[in-house]
Image: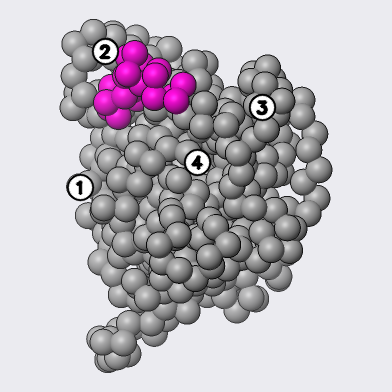
Amino acid sequence: MRKAQVNWEKRILKSLNSMCTELGIPLARKRPVPEQNELTNKWNEMGTDEPDLSKFRPVYAPKDFLEVFVGLKNPNNERSEDLTVRSHWGLIQVSLNGRDIPQMREMYPELGLTYGQLGIDDHTHVPPDLFESEHIHIGKKVVSEQDSAAAQQYSRQGCPTGLRAQLWSLILNTTNDPEAITHYEQLKARVIHHDLLVDNLIYKDVKLTASNDDYYFVFEDYLYQVLLCFSRDTAVLEHFNYNCASPPKSCMQSKSGSEQCAVVYPPNGVIPFHGFSMYVAPLCFLYNEPSKLYSVFREMYIRYFFRLHSVSSHPSGIVSLCLQFERLLQTHLPQLFYHLREIGAQPLRIAFKWIVRAFSGYLSTDQLLLLWDRILGYDSLEIVAVLAAAVFAFRAENLMEVTSLASAEAVLADLSTLKVMPLLQIFLFATSV
């Protein structure tokens, strides 16, 4: 896995450097003073800018990344007798431990059918209005006591809209104190003083994704502010201490090849890819102060989102999530899995884009935030893989009738009407094991 990650990093860096050479644009440059003044003046309305980005292309798209670990094989693991034929139906061929449904029921008891949930109107012995008013009352108490552990436990049953921003800040231990505001202002100053090649990739990504999204286009300015500051933030590098990835390094001067001039680029060690801005977009509904929005996003990234685009064996890592998704489908919907595989529509090829973005941009925002409540509540991304399998289970009848990848994708093209919590509950607690 480490080898695959290293090779992938080389590929991304090569792609970035070749773009740099082709376009004749430096990786970084100091902005002339008039340009600095102009950017300072339009900082809050960068969305009105229409730079020519036609020559820039995303360094990679999620489907390129999928190919990296589809090819992974475990050299120590022969296909022995105890492995069933079914275990080789999927695209992921490495053996990692994952939970089955009985273990998940133990892991996620609060999602059980007898528990009250925000986002569910029935299936519970407590009338929803009674549960909701009691739940909000408890939520206010948790916020007033500023208890991070209690907030985490509380969010497993969903956060009320009016309290979510405070509860998430509490769970993530982010504050909007003078120090956080100063840090944000320093990052803003770095953006104004220096222009980076990755800035164009950020602009392009926002234009291609969030700007075309019915929910998120209004937040275009916020997205530029947060993502441009994020690219300059060296504090983000701390996640490489517990991540098997390494920050990309590039040569900033003409002395190419000499190790002395190799520096981490961009400064935060994260090269944005197609869809990266969608990790920030949903948070814009919760925080309207850029410094607060920034600190919550950074914490979400260094706790969770980085795992969605680096190769590792971590239980919340993208490889484990994909394997978990395939196993759940193979175990509980073997006929569907086999049918889709036979017509050349491997389920993971369809679900991967949802998983790599933690469903951002696919679910309606209110449903997405209910899903992210549970990511924070259980401190794990595993629930993303479970939801992906639940979506296939929900649409199984239609999928059994499709005859091509295109028609399977058409059945699953629009997830905006789905209700997350009933799907998860039925899949986990009403599936016969």
Q: Which residue is mark 3?
A: 33
Label 4 environment density (alpha carbons within 10 Å; few <14, some 14–19, many ≥20): many
Magenta stretch contains residue 90: no
Residue at screen point 51% across, 60% down: 251
Q: Quadrant of the C terminus?
A: bottom left
Task: Residue 111: name its quadrant.
Answer: top left
> Which type of secondary structure does the marked residue at label 2 adopt?
helix
Q: CA distance from mark 2 to mark 4?
A: 31 Å
Residue at screen point 60% across, 79% down: 342
Q: CA distance from mark 2 to mark 3?
A: 45 Å
Q: Tell me the number on the disc at residue 143.
A: 2
Residue at screen point 42% across, 78% down: 72
Residue 233, position as x, y percentages in the image = 42, 37
Specify which label sits upstream in the sequence, 2 or 4. Answer: 2
Mark 1 in CB contact with mark 3 (< 8 angstroms)? no
Residue at screen point 50% across, 41% down: 231
Q: Which residue is mark 4?
A: 231
Is 162 located above or below residue 9 in the figure? Answer: above
What type of secondary structure mainly makes up the magenta span? helix
Mark 4 in CB contact with mark 1 (< 8 angstroms)? no
Front one among 162 and 185? 185
Q: Which residue is mark 1?
A: 106
Q: Which residues are magenta?
A: 168-186
Is residue 198 at least partly visible in the picture? no
Label 2 environment density (alpha carbons within 10 Å; few <14, some 14–19, many ≥20): some
